[in-house]
Image: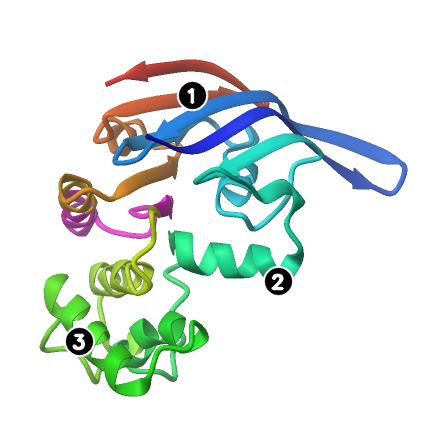
């Protein structure tokens, strides 16, 4: 089953009178349950593609279908609702809110989705136990290691049971041991049926995925099974 499809997608940024083409004629299909890495050097268009896949931005031209819905044409409100339900984000910088506990950070997406307090607290606790942080429920991010913060971020990404986990350089700020733990965790989530898309410039991380898509100068130059 096709979960994500990009058809003839272009993205151009306009800065004053200057137009900067970033993505050019991208055609891509990702099926439910795949584990895909999108890699390439700085400036290749990886981050822009991540923003488009994650419904954080719209293409300048072309269509993006997520679960059959053309997200290019949705209103901002409908796009935000779809993004909230369909995509879980894991960022290099963790993006945790320092004043909140780990439990509260994981609860946050469910709060936005309108889940009742008791239900979201239970799911947040279960997710933190799942990622090995059942003894860190009341800790703030300043009391956690980098690897622990990224595990909280993964738990938060799973909060609303998304179809896709989209990870942007998820091990970029971690030491090799913590990075390997996060890589294994993502691998395990894929084994459980989650669609995982990693955006990275690190070939070692990219090879963990089952499929590697390489970008250069805004175009797909390689798409292969690893």
Instruction: Tell me if 222 is positioned left or right of 151 in this view.
Output: right
Residue 210, magenta (yes or no): no
User: How many numbered callouts?
Assistant: 3
Give the quarter of the figure containing the N terminus. top left
Q: Is residue 91 visible?
A: no
Q: Is residue 84 above or below residue 139?
A: above
Q: Is residue 36 visible?
A: yes
Residue to which mark 1 is pinned: 214
- Region in magenta: 165-185
Report the mark closest to the observer, 1 or 3: 3
Q: Position of residue 116 (x, y in %)?
A: 33, 83
User: Where residue 125 is drawn, which disc sits there?
Assistant: 3
The one nearer the camera, 154 or 28, is 28
Say whether disc 1 or disc 3 marks the residue closer to the N-terminus: 3
Residue to which mark 2 is pinned: 77
Q: CA distance from mark 2 to mark 1?
A: 32 Å
Say whether disc 3 or disc 2 marks the residue closer to the N-terminus: 2
The residue sitting at 28% across, 78% down in the picture is 120
Report the mark closest to the observer, 3 or 2: 2
Q: Position of residue 93 (x, y in %)?
A: 40, 58
Q: Is residue 157 above or below residue 64?
A: below
Q: Is residue 24 above or below residue 11?
A: above
Q: Is residue 169 above or below residue 200?
A: below
Q: Which element carries disc 3, helix, strand or loop?
A: helix
Q: Position of residue 222 (x, y in %)?
A: 42, 13
Q: Which element carries disc 2, helix, strand or loop?
A: helix
Instruction: Tell me if 11 is positioned left or right of 117 in this view.
Output: right
Q: How many residues crowd mark 2 within 10 Å: few (<14), some (14–19), many (20+)?
A: few
The residue sitting at 25% across, 80% down in the picture is 119
Q: CA distance from mark 1 to mark 3?
A: 37 Å
Q: How many residues crowd mark 1 within 10 Å: few (<14), some (14–19), many (20+)?
A: many
């Amino acid at each position: 089953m096709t979960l994500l499809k990009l058809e003839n997608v272009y993205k151009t940024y306009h800065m004053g009178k200057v137009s900067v083409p970033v993505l050019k004629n991208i055609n891509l299909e990702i099926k439910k349950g795949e584990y895909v890495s999108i890699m390439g050097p700085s400036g290749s268009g990886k981050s822009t593609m991540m923003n488009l896949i994650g419904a954080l931005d719209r293409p300048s031209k072309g269509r993006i279908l997520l679960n059959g819905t053309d997200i290019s044409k949705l209103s901002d409100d409908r796009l935000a609702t779809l993004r909230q339900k369909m995509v879980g984000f894991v960022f290099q910088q963790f993006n945790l809110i320092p004043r909140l506990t780990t439990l509260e950070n994981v609860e946050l997406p469910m709060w936005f989705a309108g889940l009742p307090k008791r239900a979201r607290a239970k799911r947040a606790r279960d997710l933190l136990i799942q990622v090995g942080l059942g003894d860190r429920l009341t800790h703030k991010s300043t009391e956690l290691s980098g690897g622990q913060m990224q595990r909280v971020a993964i738990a938060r990404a799973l909060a609303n049971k998304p179809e896709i986990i989209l990870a942007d350089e998820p091990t970029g700020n971690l030491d090799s041991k913590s990075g390997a733990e996060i890589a294994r965790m993502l691998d395990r989530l894929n084994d459980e049926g989650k669609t995982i898309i990693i955006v990275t410039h690190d070939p070692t991380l990219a090879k963990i995925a089952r499929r590697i898509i390489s970008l250069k100068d805004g175009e797909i130059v390689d798409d292969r099974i690893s």
